[in-house]
Amino acid sequence: MPVDLKVPSPGESITEVQIRAWLKSEGESVRMDEVVAEIDTDKASMELAAPVSGVLAKILAPAGADAAVGDVIALIEEGDSPLPPPSGAGKEAAAGSEPPPDEAKRPDAPRVMPSARRVLGEAGIASASVEGTGPGGRVLKEDALQALESKAGPERIPPAASAEAPSDSAPSREPADPPPAPKPKASSRKARAVPAPNPPAVIPGATPGRTEESVRMTSMRRVIAKNLVEAQQTAALLTTFNEIDMTAVIALRKRYRALFLERHGVKLGFMSFFVRAAAEALRAVPAVNAKIEGSDIVYRSYQDIGIAVGGGRGLVVPILRNAETLGFAQIERAIADFGARAKQNKIELSELVGGTFTISNGGIYGSMLSTPIVNPPQSGVLGMHAIRDRPVAIDGKVAVRPIMYVALTYDHRIVDGREAVFFLRRIKELVESPERIWLEV
């Protein structure tokens, strides 16, 4: 009797997920606790394991589909005997899952998902040349599409395009009848041609192949969009700015960089200085660390600071719990770990919830100045930016110093302008004179 594969509950506030990818095809054998699918929630990705050993009999929710917590998304036939080949779409998936003979013989051939294999096969791209971002280095459909988009040159020119642009030295001849066009396969990425306003013949230099591509938003991106709009509509957001002379921090890093790396096994970055400075500033201005619940203001005695890091599928904000108790080495190790796991989509859901304040460093992407948006229900976010040499007045003289612009966006419903300015000025004082962090003055 088939066993139901159900969507588990990822967390209290999550009721819907999106099927990101199936790692097994219909008719394939599975082992108990083996990962068979990946699902996306509004906060992170999760792996879904088989509850029993047997054969994946039927997939009820394809990749890209939405499913509610508790929904049955597949059936697993318990036991060791294989099922007959699936029909319809299942046959196509099973056929697509078979690797080419030359790759199947190679022991180091990457594990390629069926949907990714079809994309690569149609484009003539060897799977060995594609780096997989899925669990265990699996090549997912997203990796195949990325490889397809980045591959340029003669290898990507289809035969029809080559026939339309013959070499000047080749004799002209009547084109042969084109082969019948292959029937397009169903995909979650839909492309549609945009008709030109006039026939191409009357538009000098017109470029053929102008298309638009419709890609379904992931669960995470949909919730991010919803939260950002909600923050703009419900909170009274205001941003204040300041500039920080990074001379002292740069000198400290240069002086102790090698010793810090040797002692702690991690590089000394700028973020640890800002995390410690933010923790001290949050103590001094508790309203920035508070939140609104109905008609109440909830003040916290702890600082759980979220650090925005780039992930494999976008920006995530894992939390440094009790940041006020962490040393520089602990902060740098935690941030390095977050960054590495975010690229592999391995951040746990529990690490993304419950922050009281956020720090976002747009400077690593070259941002000079920005107005970050508060992540509800938090009341503040600190934006760091690129460090640039600028002329500044010091003791009546002009000097060139490494300057970083910083921004604090805050909820004016709970944080007054005076408090916001004092908070950012406190950050400036502590970073410009980092010894004050240790002395707590």
Image: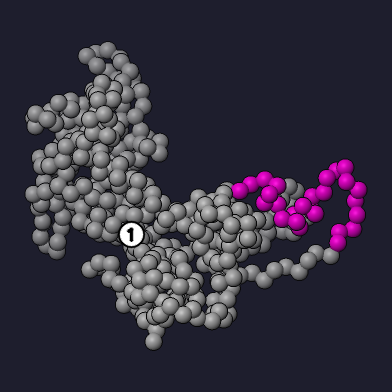
Residue at point 35%, 75% (across, down): 52
Circle 1 residues within 10 Å: few <14, some 14–19, many ≥20: many
Residue at point 55%, 72% (across, down): 94
Q: Which residue is mark 1?
A: 44
Nearer-the-camera pick, 104 or 395: 104
Q: Locate residue 416 relative to residue 181 in the image: left or right.
A: left
Question: Quadrant where the C terminus lies?
Answer: top left
Residue 131 in the image, given as x and y percentages of width and height: 50, 50
Residue at point 32%, 24% (across, down): 402
Q: Locate residue 296 relative to residue 163 in the image: left or right.
A: left
Residue 223 in the image, given as x and y percentages of width and height: 34, 62
Work out whether 249 lies above or below 335. above
Nearer-the-camera pick, 251 or 362: 251
What's the magenta bit mostly, secondary-structure-wise? Answer: loop
In magenta stretch: residue 155:
yes
Residue 310 in the image, given as x and y percentages of width and height: 37, 47
Segment tinted magenta in the rendering: 151-176
Residue type at numbered disc 1 = Ala
Work out whether 54 lies above or below 225. below
